[in-house]
Image: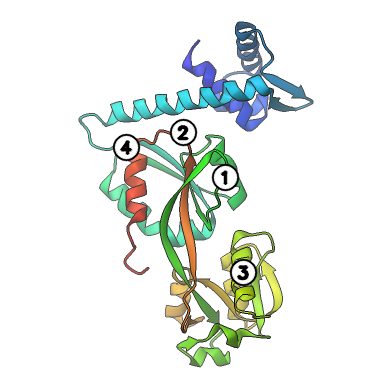
Amino acid sequence: MQIETLKVFCDLVESRSFSRAAIRNYITQSAVSQQIKNLESRFETQLLRRDGRSVTPTTAGRKFYENARAILDKYEHLQQEMKSVGQGVAGSIRVATIYSVGIYEMSVVVKSFLKIYPKVKLHVDYSKGAQVYEDCLHGVIDLGIVPYPEARKGLRIIPLPADKLVLICAPEHPFAQRSYIDISELEGHSFIAFEKGLASQRAMERIFQENDIHVNVVMEFDNIETIKRSVEIGAGVSIVPFMSVQKEVQNESLFQVHFTDKNFYRPLGIIVRRKQSLSRAARKFIELMQKPQPNA
């Protein structure tokens, strides 16, 4: 059995599509089918269920996938380590995160990392939070970076420095004249929120509930950029990570107000597969992400 066959099988399980697995491996769909047929013949058991265009692993197939993925991870780690022998840190890293984290928390780190380790190929993809978890769990990426990291089966969390939360408002808003505010003063005010179901909104709801505050949610969005634009036109106030609004604060299109007595933070974390063997390049990237940034 060749390592390429294990990769084809894992790609098929992760993509749930013969055509996508074929594209990932630069072979035909019939070649994918033949390799799967050979595997099932070798182990004398069905590894996949074919339901129309979708493909899902059987119990035996899931066990084979988990072990094949572990072998592929170790093989890739070996490749990266061998490439780095005698030439410092080299290889490639696949990272996925949500847009706001990638733009604000990661941008400085990415620039520094590529400058320090020019031989590393760093791929950064932007996805929805739920997709980052799925891609990490299925081995599509090496590292996932998410806010409010959640413990999930098969994954482990590496904590990162948290980002302080601040209130933002339009220049014409009465709060713009303040440097500090007690969170209780938000009672009854128009508020621009994240969409329900997002980790950021669940965290905000907990903060309001713990402080017995009721705001008037006038708009809901799934990203920080749209929230900032809505606050700029005076539709309401919002609470966002400090690092995400520094450009607007400098331009005075938004004003930020810090909280008195209590500070609130958005925790960040790196998620990796629990049994994953990290390459040297990935470990160096994690080390750099864990260092506090200059303007944090």
Mark 2 secondary-structure assignment: loop
Residue 59 horizontal side relative to residue 277, left or right: right
Pointer 3 residue: 206
Q: Position of residue 150 (x, y in %)?
A: 55, 52
Answer with mark 4 or mark 1, whichever residue precedes in sequence: 1
Mark 3 secondary-structure assignment: helix
Q: Position of residue 61 (x, y in %)?
A: 64, 21
Give, as a three-letter code, the residue at label 3.
Arg
Circle 2 packing at 10 Å, graded few (<14), some (14-19), many (20+), is some
Mark 1 secondary-structure assignment: loop
Mark 4 secondary-structure assignment: helix
Q: Tell me how far mark 4 sits from mark 1, CA to CA.
A: 25 Å
| Relative vertical location of residue 114 with respect to residue 85 in this rendering, above or below | below
Q: What residue lies at 53% left-to-right and 16% top-to-bottom?
A: 5
Q: What residue lies at 31% left-to-right and 54% top-to-bottom?
A: 112
Q: Position of residue 51 (x, y in %)?
A: 78, 25
Q: Tags 1 and 2 in contact by the CB under 8 Å rule? A: no
